[in-house]
Structures are given as structure tokens and as C-alpha cells.
Amino acid sequence: MTEMRKEHVKQPGIRERPGPEHLTLPGIDSRPSIDSAALSDVPSDVIIKSRIRYGSTLSACKGLLMEYAKSSSIHGIRYIFEVHRPIYEKVYWLFFTCVSVFFAFALIRSAYFKWKYSPVILGFDETLVPVHKIPFPTITVCPESKIDHFVFNYTDVSRKFLEEYKTHGNISNLSDEDLSYMAAAMHICDPEVVQRFSPLLSELNPPYVDVTQTLIDLSIPKNVTGSFCTWNGRFYLFENILDIVVTDEGICYQFNGMHPKDIYRDEKYISYVDPDIVDFNNYIKMEVPAWNEITGTWSLETGYLNQGQNAYPQRTAYSSAKNGFFAFVKGLQHNFDYDCRRFKKGYKVFFNSPESVPLTSANYILVSHGDEVLVRLLPSYVMSTESLREIPQDQRKCFFNYERELRFFRTYSQNNCQTECLANFTVSRCGCAKFWMPKPEDTPVCGLNDIACYTAAQDELYALHYNQSMTKNVKDKVEMMCNCLPACTSLEYNFEISKAKYDVGKVVRSFREEYEDMGIGTRIVVYFKEQQFTANIVYIRTTLFGVSTLISNCGGIFGLCMGISYFSFLELIYFFCMRICGSFRDRRKNKIHQIPRSRGSARRKTNPSLRS
């Protein structure tokens, strides 16, 4: 039998494949020689496919990696894994690829931390907002003289108290009424006065005192504190336009405050009721047309809805002093008291948004007797965009109204939250609430023996808050006890003041009228400084980094440094998931076909007749 040989004819246009001397068919005991030096002339595609199909497992992985590098859109990868590329070129591209990857991940890390820890930016709003879009502030006037001496002469009683105690060692001439008034006054007197008198009064065991109502009974009446006011160009009596409000400073008078039923979830949470009802149509000059009826609603997040000229809370459309708030208040010499509240004469004036309660620990204006004070308001209005709701609370550092429900208050604000936290902490420590605090209906008001307790509780809470704030700067996961973040939509009132001396006697005589002793007169004028909110007082809280912004930034960084796009990640998934599975399936098929051919070769070796 003659030996049969196939002649290989080279056809034009067809690349010659490697012969068996370069890549033999694999048998059971033999593997293809892929690393031979003769492969330098073999096309890289043939080498890569041969590695994947016929090489060892490690060689197949290398082949798959080469195939990915050859097809990948990532810059520099193809040059590192190219088959016939010189080593120095591979090192060159490896170095710069690593540098690009390093800078890409460094920039992405920076973008990620901005998105995670500071995703909110507070910027200026370019839109001009007219003053009638926001309410006029709630103005709280707190006289420093707290007790009407026609009702209770604290100076005489306190001095008589000390004289008898020093002389006889006990008190016998004070009536129960005087003891009750004295015990109630301890809640508003200076701390050193309380330290002197509280232990002595406790020994006498004064009768039960309704502290809040007693302080209201002792306070100087509204018509004595002030004579008249003007608002939006209309004249009012002081007592007809201001409400009584109980604060930490004692009994104060409030203009444009919201009703307790609109501030608190239940009016029974506060321990007093103001019988007076403010009617803005109850002005003096009746020739001025009346206000329309109040309709619609207002909230800080939605603004005024369907409200006309007579709005609730009140607003103004002009920035002049004539259309602002003016009050003439007076101080009577017989009410000046240097025994209970030392060195404090005049008025403290607070400004806050109508939905909040005034915090006496906040900024205030101290108005002295005999001064004329002009207050120009500069509202600080912070609005929030809808995109801010997508960011977690701990990242945006503020609460929307629906996110933080308070126990006592209908609306969330930082002032309301701090007030509620202090009230809850005081009740937990002392079993009672201070006379001005909101509280559950069954919780008593703190009495004379509890003054030291609620004072210590307040100091303890402030110390805890300070320590937690300092610790949070180091450990971000520390939980704050009150957690009173600012509201995402908030309204505050900054102010500029100017003052001058005011002599009411000389002013009256200048009108050629007889002057009656009206006490020491003081004028307070409050108005908006500007007709519209300019860009320096209207702020908008919006997202600096959202998820879409983060993805866009990361995509831009990847594209700039490495040429990676969305399809580059699909390539990774395709090559290292789908192609791996397909390659291993082909290798198993090749092994199955190699076994019969190997057996046929073995038979030809044993039977020489099969060779011919």
C-alpha cells in the first residue's frame, strides 16, 4: 500500500495557517506548543483562539484576557496584553494606565464623599420676592418690670420678710396671699434672689399656688404697659392688638402671633388661656375702610393660599415705617423694682416666625425707657427644592415638616423642637414642667421647691448637648439627644436698629397741650427695610450632589482618565461571564472529540498495515 499524502496548495488572498510543526493536534499525552518562538509570525487572533481552545486552564485564562484587551474600549489595556508587543512598550503603557486609574479613583472618591457628606448647598435665589409673600414677624415685648405694685408690692413685702426673719427667726405677719405671691415671684426673680428667699419660704410651707395664673394676675396690665399702636397705617389701642403670652421671661405681650390652637396640637398643653381676642378691624379711626374677612391658609412651606388683604398671620405690602408696626409703651416709676430683678429696666423685644414660639435665649433687642428705637427687618428666608427630599436627613442636615413630628407642636421648627426637648427633659428629671413649658395635661407645674430642680435640669441638658456636639465632630455616628436640626424651609428675621432719646413730656408740650404724667415714654417702630427680598436675604437649599450628578461626574472622570463608558462595563460582564462559560463548554467538546482520535492513533501504531 502506497503512502497517501495531501498536497497543501497555497491559494492567493488566503492567509497561510500554522502548520503542524507549529501547532500539532493535541492528543491525550500531548498539548499544543503555543509558546514556541516560531509563533512570532503567527497572527495574534490564531494564537489567542488556540490558547482558549487547546491550552491549559491558565493558558486559556490568559487567552481570554488577551481577547478582552484586544476588543476593550479602555485606553491602554490592549497595548499591555498584545501578543507581539515588545516588553518596554508594555511597561510604558502599564505605568501610564496605572497612573490614570489612580487619578480616576482619587477623583471619584472625592466626588463620592461630597455626595455622601455634603450633598446640600445653600445658595442665593435670583428671584425677587415681594414682602407680601411672607408674614410680618411675631413681635414679643417683655417688660423687665414684671409685677404691678398696686396688686403686690414685692419690695415692701420682701424687705419686711427679711427683717422679721432676722429679728424673730420666723414670719408671722405675712398673709397667705402675700406668701403665695412671694412664692410665685420666685420663678421670675434673679437667681441670687431665689437662692436667698426660697429656703426660707419653703420652711413656711406656703399654700398651693397656680404659678402661671398667679404671674398673670401679678403682671402689669396691657393698657398700663402701652397706650396705643399703629399697624399698616391704622391706629389701635395697645390692649386690643396684643395677646398675652407666657415665656421664660415671664408674662409678655405679643403682636401677630398665631393662636395657641394653631401652634399646639392641643390647647391643654399650655397652662393658661388668654381671654382677649385680637380683631384687626377694631381700630380707632372708623373712616378707614374695614379689612376683609380672613380666608385661606398659611404655612411656611406653602405660603399664603387664597388670603386677601386681611391675612392670618398679618402681612404688609410696603416697606415704609408708616406701614409697619409702631407701639408707644410706658414705664411707671412705682412699678420699677430693684429687689426682684436687679439692674433690669426697659423691655426685651423678640422677633420670630409666627409658627414658632419665642425663645428667650435667642437674640433680642433691649429697649431702654425713654428711647425711640427703629428696627429695620432683614428677613432670612430659606426655601428648599423638591430634589432635596431624595437625600437622607443625616446628609442634608434639615427636616421637612412631615419628617419630624413633634409631640406638642403642629409644625416643626428648630425653636419648637428645642422647647419641646427642654420640656420633656425637665419633666423626666423633676416630674413637673416649668410654668411656661408645654406639657401633658396630667403633669403638674413646678412649684417653689422645684425651682432648683428645673434650673439644674436646664443646665444639665445644655451641658449634654454641648458634649454631644463636640463628640459628634470626632465621631459622626453619635446620636444627639434633641436632634433639633433646622427646618428645610425656615424664616428668620435679622434686624438693624437705631435709637435716640425720647422725652414724651417735651413732645406733648410742643403741641401746646397740658402734660399729664404718663411715665417714661418709649417708642418702638418695626418695618421691613426693603420692598422686595434681594439675593442677599433669600436663600434656596438645593442638592449639590444627587445620584444622577454623582453618576455623571463618575462617568466623566472615567471617560477622561480611562476612556470607560457604560458599554465598557457591559464588555466586562460579557467577557468574564458569558464568554468564560462558552469557552469552557467548547473545551469540554474538544476533549470528547480528542479521545476517539487518540485511540485511532494508538491502533495505527500497533497495526502497521494501517499506515499505508
Image (tube, rainbow, N blue to C red):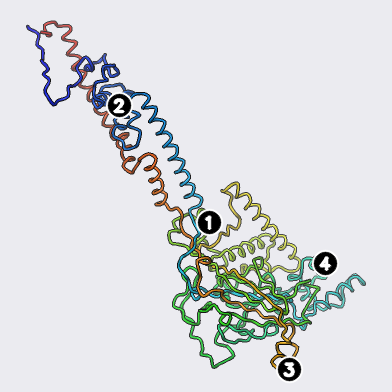
Q: Which circle's residue, 4 or 2, is located before the other in the chain?
A: 2
Q: Residues within 10 Å of mark 1 (few under 14, many from 20)?
A: some
Viewer-nearest of labels 4 and 2?
Answer: 2
- Cα distance in 3D space between marks 4 and 2: 92 Å
Task: Identify the residue under disc 2.
Answer: 63
What is the quadrant of the N terminus in the image? top left
Residue nearest the viewer, comparing 220 with 274: 220
Q: Secondary structure at mark 2?
A: helix
The residue positioned 20% from the left and 21% from the top of the image is 593
Return the residue at label 4.
196
Q: Nearer the viewer, residue 207 or 390?
A: 390
Identify the mark nearer the N-term, 1 or 3.
1
Mark 3 highlights which residue? 514
Pinpoint residue 425: horizontal percent, then vertical percent. Answer: 65, 60
> Is residue 402 at least partly visible in the picture?
no
Spatial CA distance of label 1 from label 3 is: 60 Å
